[in-house]
Image (cartoon, rainbow, N blue to C red):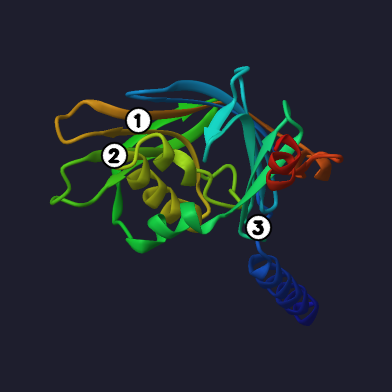
Amino acid sequence: MKDRIKRSALVAAALGATLAALPAQSFEGIVTMSMASATLKSEAIGYMKAQGFKILPKTETGVEVNGVTGGYPIIDFKAQKFYIVSPKDKYYMTLPLGQLTAPIDKVAVKIKKSGKSDSILGHKVEEWVLDDPASKAQAGIWATADFKPGFNFFISLQKTSPVEGLLLGRMAKSLVAQGLFPLGAWAKDASGATAVEMRILSIEAGKVADSELAVPEGYGKMSDALKKKK
């Protein structure tokens, strides 16, 4: 009997070690986000799956990136590509994702827990703040351990706030590496005024079709569309 119990314990320990070694599955589903800066207030729907992320702005004007207006972005972290899709003209343009990741990767920031905890959408969150006495800006991110993000979806905040948005992108990179999912964020400039506020308004885990994260069929490259207009 003792040998049987001992063998069972060894099997259980081996199974536990195997499960612990397996990577945790990243979040797949849909989130609704709000973002506010000194010059912009917007809401968007985000589709997340593996290393893919699509952001659909809740406005008719869409986003404006590199001269393309009225479109929406699709980010392929695995291929390191950033697509801007224009439904109006049925074309897309491709940009290197390094335009967004390089500034974040350039500097590693230190963060720490502020000691504050709260609940967002029924999920326990803890506040992480910038740990840099020399920084003139202040920033914080509320993150939960209930979901594991597959990528740093804060990388584009620098487009709306070059200083504070970039800072939040660097902080989020550290949290994502720990398997924590940001559900809210804030940043203040050197004067103490709020520069950026970001919030997840809803989060729903579920299957996302591969087609949601691909350029729609029949869409051409932006360069080809411009040639036709000429």
Residue at the spot of label 3? 24
Amino acid bearing label 1: Val
- In the picture, which quadrant includes the N terminus? bottom right
Q: Earlier in the sequence, mark 3 or mark 1?
A: 3
Q: Position of residue 201 (x, y in %)?
A: 55, 23
Asked whether, in this view, residue 129 is left or right of residue 45, the answer is: left
Give residue 61's quadrant in the image. Answer: top right
Q: Position of residue 125 (x, y in %)?
A: 45, 36
Single out the mark in the foreground, 2 or 1: 1
Amino acid bearing label 2: Ala
Q: Which mark is residue 139?
A: 2
What crowding class fits label 1: few (fewer than 14 Cα within 10 Å), some (14-19), or many (20 or more)? Answer: many
Q: Earlier in the sequence, mark 2 or mark 1?
A: 2
Q: Judge by depth and name the residue closer to the eye, 3 or 105.
A: 105
Asked whether, in this view, residue 47 is left or right of residue 137, the answer is: right
Describe the element under mark 2 as helix, strand or loop: strand
The residue at 51%/59% (across/down) is 98
The residue at 16%/36% (across/down) is 190
Amino acid bearing label 3: Ala
Q: Is residue 227 above or below residue 39?
A: below
Single out the mark in the foreground, 2 or 3: 2
Q: Judge by depth and name the residue closer to the eye, 75 or 182.
A: 75
Tell me whether the residue at label 2 lies in contact with that at label 3, contact meaning CB atoms closer than 8 angstroms. Answer: no
Residue at the spot of label 1? 196
Q: Is residue 103 above or below residue 123?
A: below
Q: Earlier in the sequence, mark 2 or mark 3?
A: 3
The residue at 73%/30% (across/down) is 89
Real-space Cα separation, disc 2 to disc 1, in angstroms = 9 Å
Q: Residue furthest bottom?
A: 3
For residue 126, say whether it is visible.
yes
Q: Position of residue 41 (x, y in %)?
A: 44, 20
Give residue 108's quadrant in the image. Answer: bottom left
